[in-house]
Image (cartoon, rainbow, N blue to C red):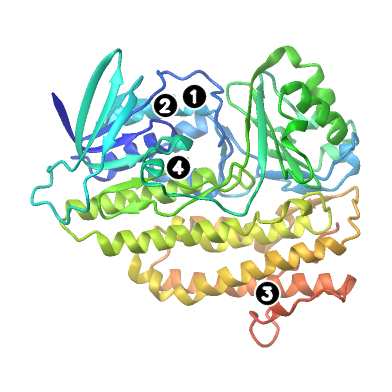
């Protein structure tokens, strides 16, 4: 017998389960089936990348999916990103630290993925979705573009799966690929698209807390943060061509990862736990010392070679779509993976809703595809050829400020203000979006050039993001609720702020390195000075 459903989601991880929940919250009449290969419940500290969230993902999980109470009670609130320019150093209190001294207004979280996905599965079922674990997809057929079927329940695609030795089939109107790197539809349609970002990663979990605050007894260093919760941050230990993450999990484990440019740090130098520990002894000896005493608490180890990739198409008017790692994946730096899940799921939900209303899908699928791919390309510029800069204590903090300002000022505004799918309103701010995207690309190139000339002075100081009023306010402004005119004004104001910041960056760089070519950035700036209300260079460091 062939079962029928409105939507089948192949993959019941983070992307698939959140989509099922979003669809059922928006369209409770939908019959949604999620097929997950693994058995549930998943164990705590499940070995998956994507444990750290930033503002879009946190807002998506909390506000859009209604999980804010759960996140606050059962997961860890994140103390922002934190960077230590600690390559080859043990004295963490004597290197440049970049982070915030206090929590900012908009919360983000560290996710124990096992605990979270177990909760999502329960929530999806409670919303009315059907969750089938232990289901191995054996095959599927995609119908050609069917135009507009006369009946809303007309099946178009068919999926076959095996569970407990039995074969099952489902006919469905929409087929969604959330199968992760397996990429069922991507592979079937040959949609994978390589990009120019070549990096690899190894990571593992330790069944104990790693508390960076215990790495110094200097009272002045310890009291830089109030409260002293550095361990709650996504701590980045950075050096030329690499960064190491430290992410705490609610289960009590700690996630440790190394991400590196293979031209500087080959994968073979860290491809097992023992090799990774040897690599850390050279590059991050204080962390290596911490791990030596926790060898017996190693929980797992995994590696990924050339993890970044694109996808030629993720949404189709033929009623299929890709979400999560089944579509694109950029880099774990800045934790964009869950953000792109939130964005893709929102576009998919909107397409399904328009389909329910009998609207033609082709124009919307095309526009959403263009927007999604532009977000992907703009974010990719944050990573391309940037790894040599990671260990630069002078230029890298400037890049982080710029990247945050671009993220909070542009992409976050679209998501928090629920404007991602408002095609008419987005058209009215097209000029601002194009201008900020072009400026971001030019600034990223300039930062790379500046870092090549940098003296890389590593001051024993903290660059406190919370000390900049305009920066704190930009974060807080994400919670505002704006009408159409207010949204347009916000996007224009944030463009001006980015232009002011870009002008300040090139002025400061040229003061030390007048030989640098800033013409590409200057060409995108308005005539006459536009200054940020508070300058980056007012920071003591």
Res 9 quadrant in image: top left
Q: Residue at the spot x=22%, y=53% of the render?
A: 145
Q: Alpha carbon of mark 3 to alpha carbon of mark 2: how far?
A: 44 Å
Q: Alpha carbon of mark 1 to alpha carbon of mark 3: how far?
A: 43 Å
Q: Alpha carbon of mark 3 to alpha carbon of mark 4: how far?
A: 35 Å
Q: Residues within 10 Å of mark 4 (few under 14, many from 20)?
A: many
Q: Do the residues labelled 3 and 4 touch (CB within 8 Å)?
A: no
Q: Residues within 10 Å of mark 1 (few under 14, many from 20)?
A: many
Residue 389 coordinates in the image, percent (x, y): 78, 54
Residue 113 coordinates in the image, percent (x, y): 52, 29
Q: Alpha carbon of mark 4 to alpha carbon of mark 2: how far?
A: 18 Å
Foreground pick, 317 / 233: 317
Foreground pick, 119 / 473: 119
* Mark closer to the observer (3, 4): 4
Q: What label sits on residue 115 in the rendered view?
A: 1
Q: Identify residue for label 2.
A: 119
Total numbered circles: 4
Which of the two discs, 3 and 2, labels the residue nearer the N terminus?
A: 2
Secondary element under disc 2, as helix, strand or loop, is helix
Which of the two discs, 1 and 3, labels the residue nearer the N terminus?
A: 1
Question: Relative to residue 20, is residue 78 drawn left or right?
Answer: right
Which of the two discs, 3 and 4, labels the residue nearer the N terminus?
A: 4
Q: Identify residue for label 4.
A: 324
Q: Do the residues labelled 2 and 1 touch (CB within 8 Å)?
A: yes
Residue 119 coordinates in the image, percent (x, y): 42, 26
Q: Identify residue for label 3.
A: 500
């Amino acid at each position: 017998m062939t079962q029928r459903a409105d939507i089948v989601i192949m993959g019941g991880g983070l992307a698939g389960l959140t989509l099922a929940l979003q669809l059922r919250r928006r369209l409770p009449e939908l019959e949604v089936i999620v097929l997950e290969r693994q058995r549930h419940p998943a164990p705590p500290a499940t070995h998956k990348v994507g444990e750290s969230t930033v503002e879009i993902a946190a807002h998506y999980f909390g506000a859009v999916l209604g999980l804010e109470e759960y996140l606050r009670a059962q997961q860890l609130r994140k103390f922002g990103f934190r960077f230590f320019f600690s390559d080859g150093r043990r004295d963490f209190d004597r290197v440049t630290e970049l982070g915030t001294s206090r929590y900012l207004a908009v919360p983000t979280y560290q996710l124990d993925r096992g605990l979270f996905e177990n909760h999502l599965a329960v929530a999806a079922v409670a919303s009315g979705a059907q969750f089938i674990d232990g289901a191995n997809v054996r095959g599927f057929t995609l119908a050609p573009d069917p135009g507009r079927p006369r009946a809303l329940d007309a099946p178009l695609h068919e999926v076959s799966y095996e569970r407990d030795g039995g074969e099952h089939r489902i006919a469905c109107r929409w087929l969604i690929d959330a199968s992760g790197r397996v990429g069922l539809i991507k592979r079937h349609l040959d949609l994978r698209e390589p990009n120019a970002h070549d990096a690899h990663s190894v990571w593992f979990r330790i069944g104990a807390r790693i508390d960076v605050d215990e790495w110094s007894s200097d009272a002045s260093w310890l009291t830089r943060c109030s409260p002293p919760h550095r361990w709650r941050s996504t701590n980045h230990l950075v050096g030329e061509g690499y960064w190491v993450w430290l992410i705490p999990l609610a289960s009590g484990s700690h996630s440790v990862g190394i991400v590196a440019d293979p031209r500087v740090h080959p994968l073979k130098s860290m491809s097992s736990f023992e090799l990774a520990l040897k690599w850390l002894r050279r590059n991050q000896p204080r962390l290596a010392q911490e791990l030596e005493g926790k060898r017996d608490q190693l929980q797992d180890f995994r590696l990924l070679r050339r993890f970044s990739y694109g996808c030629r198409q993720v949404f189709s008017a033929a009623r299929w779509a890709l979400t999560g790692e089944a579509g694109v994946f950029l880099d774990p730096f800045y934790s964009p993976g869950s953000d792109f899940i939130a964005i893709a799921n929102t576009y998919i939900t909107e397409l399904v809703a328009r389909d329910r209303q009998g609207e033609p899908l082709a124009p919307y699928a095309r526009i959403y595809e263009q927007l999604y791919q532009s977000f992907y390309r703009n974010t990719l510029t944050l990573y391309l050829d940037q790894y040599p800069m990671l260990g630069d204590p002078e230029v890298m903090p400037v890049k982080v400020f710029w990247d945050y300002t671009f993220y909070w000022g542009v992409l976050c505004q679209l998501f928090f203000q629920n404007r991602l799918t408002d095609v008419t309103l987005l058209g009215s701010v097209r000029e601002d979006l194009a201008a900020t995207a072009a400026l971001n690309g030019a600034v990223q190139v300039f930062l790379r050039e500046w870092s090549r000339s940098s003296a890389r002075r590593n001051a024993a100081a903290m660059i406190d993001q919370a000390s900049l009023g305009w920066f704190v306010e930009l974060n807080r402004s994400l919670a505002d609720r704006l009408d159409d005119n207010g949204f347009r004004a916000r996007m224009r104001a944030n463009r001006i702020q980015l232009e002011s910041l870009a002008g300040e960056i090139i002025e400061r760089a040229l003061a030390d390195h007048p030989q640098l070519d800033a013409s590409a950035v200057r060409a995108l700036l308005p005539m006459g000075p536009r200054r940020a209300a508070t300058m980056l260079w007012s920071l003591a460091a």
